[in-house]
Image (cartoon, rainbow, N blue to C red):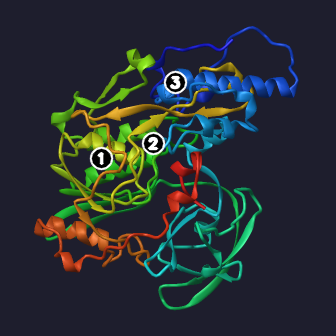
Amino acid sequence: MDIKINFPRLLSLVVFLPSLFFYLGCQEDIEDPVHIEKKVKSTIYQSMKEWYYWNERLPASVNPELYDDYEGLLDQLRYEPLDRWSYITTQEAFARAFTGQNIGHGFGWSLDENENLFLTFVYEDSPAGQDGWQRGWEILKINGQPISNYKTEQGYNFELGPSESGISNSFTFLLPDGSTTTRNNTKAPYQSNSVLYQDIIDLSGNKVGYWAYNSFKATAGISPTKSLEVDNSLQYFESQSIDELIIDLRYNGGGSVAVAEQILNYLVPSHGDGKIMYTNQLNVDKAKFNESKTFDKKGNLELERIIFITSRGSASSSELVINCLTPYLDVILIGENTYGKPVGAFPLSTYYRTLAENDLELVPITFATANANGNAEYYEGFPVDFSIGDDFSKNWGEQGEPRLEAALNYILQGSFPAEERRKVVTPSWNMIDDFEGLKKEFPVY
């Protein structure tokens, strides 16, 4: 039988501690594969009816056995056009992703307005990072083929192969100094870092903290709900007595809600201590489990405003942080409108023995979050206060990078550059759109 567990005790834990829960019930005889598949499909349907945020929008009649696989069934149950995120994965893959344990090359990239392809970030311990790759390198060829050869009617398909150890690809780069280099790189396991860059910028006597934060991940092997990188970075900014803070979330697709809460407790001013951070809103059948999370102020940062650098790749927990801080201090957004994900999910294998025993992690959208002002509807994303394009040829913190420069100018001048000085480009392709399911939250190649 499938056992239900008191929901409020799980909300902040279930996403990060699936291995800590156990499953009760009568011991069942070994079943044949066909029967097991039918049972799993039935459980997926039943769990969606119980927990899915849009359960009232589910098809009136569904025969789970008619679908070839579990993903096909979930696709049929998904409420479109709002649900772009519900997915199925394995328990191991889920746990590894939320602690930054990956297999791959370990980089991101993007196209500029002329469809030139640049590295946008590189994880330090990844195969690419260990080979010295840097943001700002232009990719001229992949496996000997020019970038234009990978263009399709739907966008680009770079055909880098599965995320498995031993898969190799060749990349030819144009480096910032004008030289070219060809590197062969082999996918391998690595631990990704969330903090891509941090610095203190002296701006006419003001200390400005600049923090490029790439994903909300707990520290593997240390804590399932806490990031030591977050503690180290924000305590460093505290020790430097910063006057302003710029948080760069332009490629941050989301991640752990618990780590987002950790960050929020550092950033909220003292007058927000003990007040509402956010309120969860579940479906109508589970409304009794709606609850509010309150701030528990940490450290000594007392900022009157925070400037966020965002893009369409800023989603989920990135937007949660922005939304939760808005009632308590001035929030300025620079760059591009955010993605638009005001909803969240927790895995359902904790509640359903059938899923757990078959190593399936069903992660449908299960709740929305509202800030202290009740704002829970931002499916179109948060609009920026100043729209300005990315310059992928500039490394982190480099002088002249337009989004960081706009943020610094705003601090210095109290205004943004004139309209005609903006560098605004609508990307023809976004990296986040190249990924589905679990990988959409942590997009990386």
Marks 1 and 3 in Cβ contact (< 8 Å): no
Amino acid marked by disc 2: Leu
Q: Which residue shows up at 53% across the image and 28% down it?
A: 14
The percent position of residue 192, horizontal first and vertical second, equals 55, 54
Select label 1 or label 3 by which is in front: 3
Q: Quadrant of the N terminus?
A: top right
Q: Label 2: state its secondary structure.
A: loop
Using the image, tell me which numbered label, if any, was put on residue 51. 3
Q: Is residue 314 above or below residue 80?
A: below
The percent position of residue 260, horizontal first and vertical second, equals 39, 41
Task: Of the two numbered discs 2 and 3 on the same chain, state the one appearing first in sequence.
Answer: 3
Left or right of residue 139: residue 104: right
Q: Residue furthest bottom?
A: 178
- What is the spatial separation of the Cα atoms under label 2 and label 3, in whole angstroms? 16 Å
The percent position of residue 173, horizontal first and vertical second, equals 58, 82
Q: Is residue 33 above or below residue 377?
A: above
Select label 2 or label 1 by which is in front: 2
Q: Which residue shows up at 18% across the image and 74% down it?
A: 417
- What is the spatial separation of the Cα atoms under label 1 and label 3, in whole angstroms? 26 Å
Marks 2 and 3 in Cβ contact (< 8 Å): no
Q: Quadrant of the C terminus?
A: bottom right
Q: Label 1: how many residues lie within 10 Å, few (<14), some (14-19) or many (20+)?
A: some
The percent position of residue 182, horizontal first and vertical second, equals 66, 83
Q: Residue furthest top?
A: 26
Residue 359 appears in view: yes
Q: Is residue 337 above or below residue 83?
A: below
Q: Nearer the viewer, residue 170 or 370?
A: 370
Amino acid marked by disc 1: Ile
Q: Label 1: state its secondary structure.
A: helix
Using the image, tell me which numbered label, if any, was put on residue 82. 2
**What residue would you read off at disc 1?**
322
Amino acid marked by disc 3: Trp
